[in-house]
Structure formats: C-alpha cells, structure tokens
Image: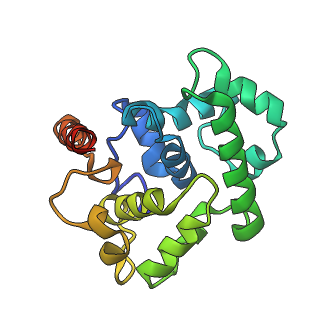
Amino acid sequence: MRGVETTQLHLSGDPDADALLSRDALALTIGMVLDQQVPIEWAFRGPYELARRLGRDRLDAVELAAADAEQLIAIFARPPALHRYPASMAKRVQALCAHVVDRYGGDIEAVWRGVDDGGQVLARLQKLPGFGAQKARIFLALLGKQCGVRPSGWREAAGGYGEEAVFRSAADVTDADTLARVRAYKKELKAQK
C-alpha cells in the first residue's frame, strides 16, 4: 500500500477507523475478512475496534496468531460485537494471521509486494483463510483501485470488480454516494435472484 500520506480510504464511515485502514494493510485485510453478512461499514470498523480493545494503534499478525483463542473470541464478542458471528470471525482472523506468519513472516503486504502479475496476486489472496474466489477478486480490485497495488493484469484478474466506473463492491466505496451506489447494485442483484 502507498500509506496514509497518499491513500485515504473511506470504507467505515468513521475517520479514525478509516485512518487505520489506510495505514495498516493487515487491518484492511481483516476488514475484508469481516465483510460478510454485515454492512460494509460495520465490517471495516471492526479492525479499529479490535485494535482499540487490544490497546494498540496497529494490528500485528504475530500477536493475533499467538493469542489465546478463547480470549480472542471474548474480545470479538464483547458488546458491541465486532461481527454478527464473533466466534467464527475471531477464528478466521486468527487463521488468517497464522497463515501470514507462516508464509510471509507476519508481513501481509508480502502477499502482493514485488509480485508483477495480477493473476499471481489473486492466487495468493485466494489461499488466505477467510478468502474465497469472489472475496479475493474484490480485494484485488480494492488494492488496485484505491491502494496503488497494480501488477500487470490486475483488472483482468479481478474480473468485473476491476472494471472502471462500476459500483459493485467495497473496492468502489470512496464516500457516502459510492456506498449508496454499491448498496443499490447489491439490492438489484438480490432482486434478480
């Protein structure tokens, strides 16, 4: 990621939470994991609240991977819960962090840093716990559109989520208006099903 100086995300509706997402790639990745069956803002506020509850200004993959699982679940479940399914999401976040520690030395940005091929970044994202094919494509699009991570072929690898001027996912949320457009798109998709 380019960092807080050049990237300012607007995913959570909370300036402090967005500032954390902008400067902490692990927080952003955890927000993506939490972006399931809850509103986008709730999902992306979760990492900030997690960091606050841990007494940290950033999230650390090594610390989260090594945390006592039951204590981590309790932190996720403390009202207001960080997710609709706090125990399940605490386990997913811990599994994500363990994977990042085991494969990338605790550095989430190593998943995409120095990788010149969008398809390869996508393949690495799909191996992250809590990510499936669709979530990996959305996250690749978010990295490309808003964080300056643009390996060759990233738009194609992200599929429809990588297209310009669409409002399909968190990758396209830059303010309240684009959030409303993403919500309208998702509502339309549900109506079609």
Task: Locate residue 12: give its quadrant.
Answer: top left
Q: Quadrant of residue 93?
A: top right
Q: Give how far across and how far down residue 170 sits, in percent.
A: 34, 48
> Seen from this angle, which residue lies furthest top?
79
User: Which residue is more in the foreground, 55 or 147?
Assistant: 147
Residue drawn at 80 percent across, 28 percent down: 71
Visible residue check, residue 48: yes
Residue displayed at 69% across by 69% down: 104
Number of marks in picture: 0
Please report the residue visible at 32 percent of the width from the left and 69 percent of the height from the top. 159
Front residue of this view, candidates 174 and 34: 34
Image position, residue 27 (x, y; %): 54, 46
Q: Height in image: 45 above or below 91?
A: above
Res 51 → quadrant = top right
Q: Is residue 154 above or below residue 106?
A: below
Nearest the viewer among 56 and 163 is: 163
Residue 8 visible from this viewpoint: no
> At 52% from the left edge and 33% from the top edge, which residue is drawn?
46
Residue 76, horizontal then vertical, whole percent: 65, 27
Seen as rendered, the residue at the extreme front is: 193
Left/right of residue 6 with respect to residue 31 in the rendered view: left
Residue 79: percent from left, percent from top: 60, 14
Location of residue 65 with respect to 151 vertically, above or below: above
